[in-house]
Every structure is written in structure tokens, then in C-alpha cells.
Image: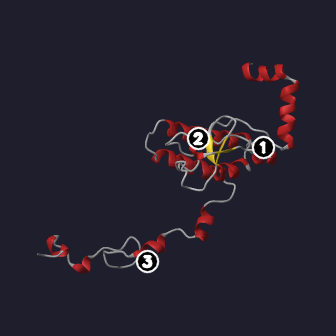
Amino acid sequence: MADYFAEHNIKPSESRTSVFGGGRRNHNPDLTDFFNVAPTPETMQQQVAPGDIGSTLRFFQAIQQRIPDHGESDETLDNLITQLMNEADSGSKGAPPASAKFIKQLPTIQVSAIPEGSSCVVCSDQFSATVDDSATRMPCRHIFHKTCLVPWLELHNTCSTCRQEVPSDDPNWLAQKAREENNPEEMQDLMFG
């Protein structure tokens, strides 16, 4: 049996330059060739500047293009990208953190009370009585592992699934809620023109 070069009428001296190493190398790149072109933390920081919202949006758009069509998950990603784009355009900093009192008062749910086959929408792991992980329910009835939900609530005063608001200690948020309660007609005018 002839080798590859003989079968394709190629002389070993005509071997092409390796794409990975940049010099004359054999046709079988090894792991070091990949490490030589792989991004390092230094080069990654040079490519993406902190606070570059455009890079973040391009990242999510690239993810969206690679995800197969799963209906609801595709719609969720569309909503997330739309929300990020709107926040970038408006200069908004996003939802404030949930109040510490609200987070502390989250109910603990027995895993046995959760329908079988249900999973946490954050980590996608099924709730299991064998795993020592407590679950909790938001006022909107969405169920999460407490370890998944609390970090989200420490940054946002909304359900991570449906965006229903929960109380916040943020002074700007409290002032906005007070204005909404004092001027319900104004809020209706803003909504319906």
C-alpha cells in the first residue's frame, strides 16, 4: 500500500506550509500549534475593551445565529438581545438589585412539592430530592434553585424568566414607584398616548 504522497503524486519536499506554525512543518499539527494561535488573556483584553456594549451585542447575535430553532428558547434570546440593544441605546443601567429583605424572605420549597421533571430555568438542572439544594418560588410562580436565583436578584429586581418586578431598596426605583402611584393618569397617558 502506497503512502499519501505516492497516491497523490506529491513529493514530500513539496509539502505546504503549516497554517498553524507559520513555517515549514509537517502536515500533522500537534497541540502546541493550536496553543500558538489560541487567544491568551492578554490578547483577549486587547480585542474587547471593558464596557464595549457593541462587542457584547455582537457576541449575543453570534450565539443567536448558532442556536438551532427551538421556538421558546429562540424567542427568549431575541428578547434578551432586544433588551440589551434598547438599554445600550437609552443609556439605561438596567434594573436595580432586589431588596435584601425580599431576598431574605424568599420561601424555601420542598423538592417533593415540585412537579416531577421540572427544572431550574437558570441552570437547566432538574430538581432532585437526592441533591442537597433548596428551591424557591418567585411571586410570579417561577421556581429556581435558591443558589441560582439569589445572585440574579442581587443584581436585578426582576424575575429572570418573565421580568416581573419585585421590591428594591434603590432610591431611584423607589422614587419612580412613588411617582407612578401618585400620578396613575400620567402613566396611562405614557402607555396609551
x%, y% of residue 84? 64, 43
Q: Callout 3, which amino acid? A: Thr
Residue 94 lies left or right of residue 74; in this view the side is: right
For residue 134, the mark is: none
Q: Earlier in the sequence, mark 3 or mark 1?
A: 3
Q: Residue at x 59, y 65 (%)?
A: 44
Q: Residue at x 41, y 72 (%)?
A: 20
Dot in front, 3 or 1? 1
Q: Which residue is nearer to you in this view: 12 or 30?
A: 30
For residue 113, the mark is: 2
Q: Callout 2, which amino acid? A: Ala
Q: Residue furthest left?
A: 1
In the structure shown, which secondary structural element does the residue marked by tag 3 occupy? helix
Up/down of 24 relative to 91, above or below: below
Q: In which quarter of the view is residue 11 placed? A: bottom left
Residue at numbered disc 1:
102
Residue at numbered disc 3:
32
Q: Residue at x 66, y 60 (%)?
A: 49
Dot in front, 2 or 1? 2
Q: Which residue is nearer to you in this view: 134 or 65?
A: 134
Up/down of 124 relative to 184, above or below: below
Residue 19 can be seen, yes or no: yes
Q: Which residue is nearer to you in this view: 84 or 49?
A: 84
Q: In which quarter of the view is residue 168 placed? A: top right
